[in-house]
Amino acid sequence: MPLSDFPELVRAHAGLIHKVARAYCRDATDREDVVQEICVQLWRAHGRYDGRHRPSTWIHRIALNTAISFHRRERRHRGPREGVEGLAVPMADTAEQDEQVALLWRCLDDLGPLDKALVLLWLEGHDHATTAGVLGLSTSNVGTRLARIKDRLRVAFAARGGTQGTA
């Protein structure tokens, strides 16, 4: 990838980068740090981008790996922390839907880093093969894990007072 294309690539995928950072960091300062670290890691890796995958897949992989590493490092240094506030996704128009979305993201807080990454990729509409490529898993493993995660989320969501049909 030419150096001249790098700033535009980052701008074009800024939403994806921020969404990943929000999924792994509750604190706004930590989110900013993760976004910066993701950009640094993208810069370091841009010369190795070989075009076998779409740029968004490549960015997802680097962003998720960077955010997961940050999350693990922070948990070791600071201890367990409460979950995330939510992702930078458009919210629904009604207060009830906003509450349901917030409740869903609180349920996602209980997931481990890899499971959270699976859900993020699924919510963005990526197929199992793309998700497998981003996370370094087999396609069948992605399908199996997602089915189990959805079941856990349904139970957790219902236990916290959410309406069915969300996961």
Image: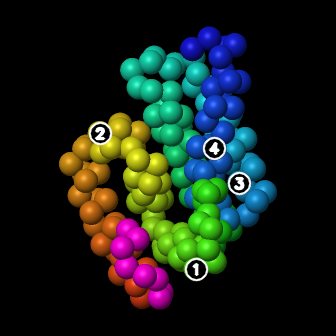
Give the CA distance from mark 2 to mark 1. 35 Å
Q: Residues within 10 Å of mark 3 (few under 14, many from 20)?
A: many
Answer with mark 3 or mark 2, whichever residue precedes in sequence.
3
Q: Dividing the picture into quarters, in which one does residue 22 lie?
A: bottom right
Q: Nearer the viewer, residue 102 or 75?
A: 102
- Residue topped by disc 2: 129
Q: For residue 31, which numbered disc appears in the image?
A: 3
Range shown magenta: 160-167
Mark 3 or 2: the one toward you:
2
Residue at the spot of label 4: 15
Tag 3 secondary structure: helix
Dot 2 or dot 4: first in sequence order is: 4
User: From mark 3 to mark 2, how far is it between C-alphas?
Assistant: 28 Å
Quarter of the picture holding the N terminus: top right
Q: Does the magenta segment cover residue 163?
A: yes
Disc 2 marks a residue whose amino acid type is: Ala
Between label 4 and label 3, give the one nearer the viewer: 4
- Choose mark 2 or mark 1, whichever is in front: 1
| Residue 123 position within the rendered picture, expressed as x and y whole percent measured from the top left | 44, 54
- Residue lying at the far left in this picture: please name it: 140
Q: Mark 1 sits on what residue?
A: 96
Q: Nearer the viewer, mark 1 or mark 3?
A: 1
Measure the alpha-carbon separation of dots 1 and 4: 25 Å
User: What amino acid type should be assigned to the residue bearing mark 4?
Assistant: Gly
